[in-house]
Image (tube, rainbow, N blue to C red):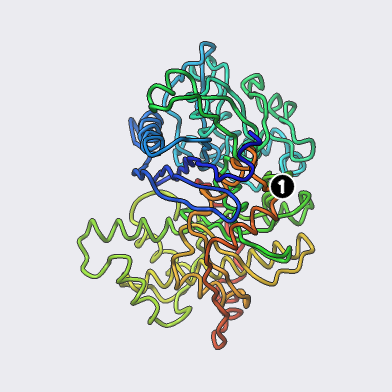
Amino acid sequence: MGSHASAPLRLAAVDLGATSGRVMSARVGPGTLRLDEAHRFPNAAVRARGSLFWDILGIHREMLAGLRMVAGTGPLDGIGIDSWAIDHGLLDRDGVLLGNPYSHRDPRTDGVSGRIAEEVGAAALYATTGLQDLPFATIHQLVAARGTAALEAADTLLLLPDLLGYWLTGHAGAERTNASTTGLYDVNTRAWAVDLARAVGIPWGLLPPLRDPGTVIGPLLPEVTDQLGVSSPVPVVAVGSHDTASAVVAVPAADDDVAYISSGTWSLVGLELEKPVLSEAARLADFTNEAGVDGTVRFLKNVTGLWVLSESLRTWSERRLAGADLASVLAAAAEAPALRTVVDINDPRLLAPGDLPGRLQLLAEEAGEPVPRTPQAITRCILDSLALAYRRHLRTAAELAGRRVSVVHVVGGGSQNRLLCQLTADATGLPVLAGPVEAAALGNVLVQARALGADLPDLGAMRTLVRTTHEVRRYEPRPGVDWDAAERRLGAVTAAPPTRGTS
């Protein structure tokens, strides 16, 4: 692999989101970091008999189609897979998938969080896992499955990127950044929390061996090599398989005094630290400590993200409302009065698919705020409320970690939303640097490249390459809007934890 140290590597990044997936072709080398989209496909949970499932075989089929496209245009040096967290497949002792994985938006985990807190204790749970109370985490899903035929027949649990990697290579394992989101990972020992699994009645033998980002999982199986039409077995590399972990790798930060927002369906708002923050104040503030690449910790808050806007757009489209497309509502929202209506964007009622505009109107009415009636007013309410949440959580993160923050980096799809980025700068009083958009895929290929011999010894080198090859847009805070007053209007509401979503 050392022969690749100077020549650009040609890599494939499989980057899966809860609403779409994509396979990217990349070239990585000295002064070179280029991504091209080879294949994009829609993704959505499928409802059957009242439950929500992922069509994992459909995702696998589309992944292979994209990899064939990349392999068809030249030699391929490596493959990496990242996705949202928490959701998983169960394999029997023959390595066969026992059923379609549930979506974290499925309601079967309702009420499980309280049961686990009673059995273990909320403070003890946080001291072990360092996670905010996400009632849809893997531990909650497994407790909800106690006594089911599927769990009783299961031999191995694989998170979704690891499951897809298993089908490519035949090697089972759990990449650490994603494992740390399960609620079954000890953030102190960096090992599975076996005693915790026992305490809540989960068969801990399901948990596969852990592996670090940058580990070569194995070469493609012969049958997959044939399917992709490649002449030699391509190595599959464990990247930061939690998409946020990969996205944070590609934050083009030059200094340490930065915060990040990985902005997409969900917003992950936080800091990169050397060690977890496990104080009682951090637990009560509902902050989470997740593993990052190179032993770092992602100290962050899950915030309901642009899901609320995308689901509102879907609702307006179904109702065939004129002028309710994304470009139109954003243009009109930019001219709307600032902070006329703000709501608690993390209210659990904004979780499930359905009439999100109606639910926002109900939240506004309950909060004593002017009720937004038009798509444009609702859009401005969503974006103002998101920016207000970012302001609150970034300040709290800095206080809890004892860190100074001088700039906010916004990466991911939300970095293209110019109005939201400007409102974030206004709300935080800090410059916002927006981009790159495809941060998760970039972090994916950077970790692959280092594993395969590229001269990228640390995160600093990776981020330097991002800065020198990708432009970012800078937003300066504008004066004149009283964000403190907006916060007071919400009555310093402590938002309930978001109820199902990780990316």
Q: Residue at x 41, y 43 (%)?
A: 21
Figure check: 165 above or below 269: above
Q: Position of residue 90 (x, y in %)?
A: 51, 23
Q: Position of residue 366 (x, y in %)?
A: 46, 67
Left or right: where does residue 149 sit relative to residue 477? Answer: left
Left or right: where does residue 84 sit relative to residue 353? Answer: right
Residue position for label 1: 457
Tally the numbered discs: 1
Figure check: 221 above or below 458: above
Q: Residues within 10 Å of mark 1 (few under 14, many from 20)?
A: few
Kindly tell me whether residue 221 is visible in this rendering: yes
Q: Residue at x 27, y 67 (%)?
A: 324
Q: Residue at x 55, y 88 (%)?
A: 480
Q: Amino acid at mark 1?
A: Pro
Q: Position of residue 219 (x, y in %)?
A: 54, 24
Q: Nearer the viewer, residue 153 or 261?
A: 261
Q: Residue furthest bottom?
A: 480
Q: Nearer the viewer, residue 447 or 422?
A: 447
Q: Nearer the viewer, residue 97 or 286?
A: 97
